[in-house]
Image (tube, rainbow, N blue to C red):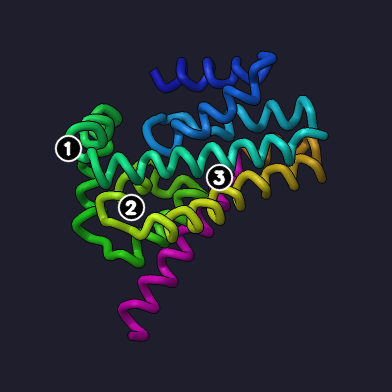
Amino acid sequence: MLRRLYDWTMSLAARKSAERWLAVIAFIESSIFLVPADVLYLPMALAKPQKAWRYAIIATVASVLGGIAGWFLGYYAFETVARPILEFYGKYEAFERLRTSVNYEMVLLLLVTSGLAHLPPIKVVTILSGVAHINIWLFIVSAIVARGGRFLLLAWLLQRYGEPIREFIEKRLGQIAMVGAAVLIVLYVAYRYFLH
């Protein structure tokens, strides 16, 4: 099923309505969808490099709005809507482990790491932010920094290096971002538990 979703998302890049689809995918990725918006963003930006920044802004705005939707699902409709979504994707147990083991500050850190590196998946953290009653304005600023940072970095890389960077982005950038996110989490834990 995931492969079919991925292929379908990739096919949207060639359509005239690709910008609208990018906004839709970025929005729902942040609250209920499995396939990251990067899958659509990369072929679009490579096909029209002069629009890479425009696409990055569209993806950022839509992703932040989708994150806000995820926050509202967690805050107001966890049992009726968010929990069934998490169960459908097999993420409910991971969600519960996170919910019982993290504090307010850690949720904010996870929001940044998931926005930058999908660690953990963004939809899990946006819903968790609502459940944890993270201040909505702080949530929005964190989401803008994280998602904007990711899409604008991709735009810069594609503008600077073009097609040759595509394989690196698809295969290595995610790993590098995950390592960076893991380092942030380790530094936070070290600060919280060893230096406090």
Q: Secondary structure at mark 1?
A: helix
- In the image, which disc is placed on residue 174? 3
Q: CA distance from mark 2 to mark 1?
A: 15 Å
Q: Main secondary structure of the magenta part?
A: helix
Q: Secondary structure at mark 2?
A: helix
Which region shows up in magenta? Answer: 171-196
Specify the quadrant of the image occupied by residue 158. top right
- The disc, 3 or 1, on the residue closer to the chain's N-terminal end is 1
Is 114 part of what is drawn in magenta? Answer: no
Q: CA distance from mark 3 to mark 1?
A: 32 Å
Q: Residue at x 63, y 44 (%)?
A: 151
Q: Which residue type does callout 3 highlight?
A: Gly
Relative image position of residue 48 (x, y in whole percent): 79, 28
Q: CA distance from mark 2 to mark 3?
A: 23 Å
Q: Is residue 146 above or below residue 47?
A: below
Relative image position of residue 125 (x, y in whole percent): 36, 48
Where does label 2 land, which residue? 129
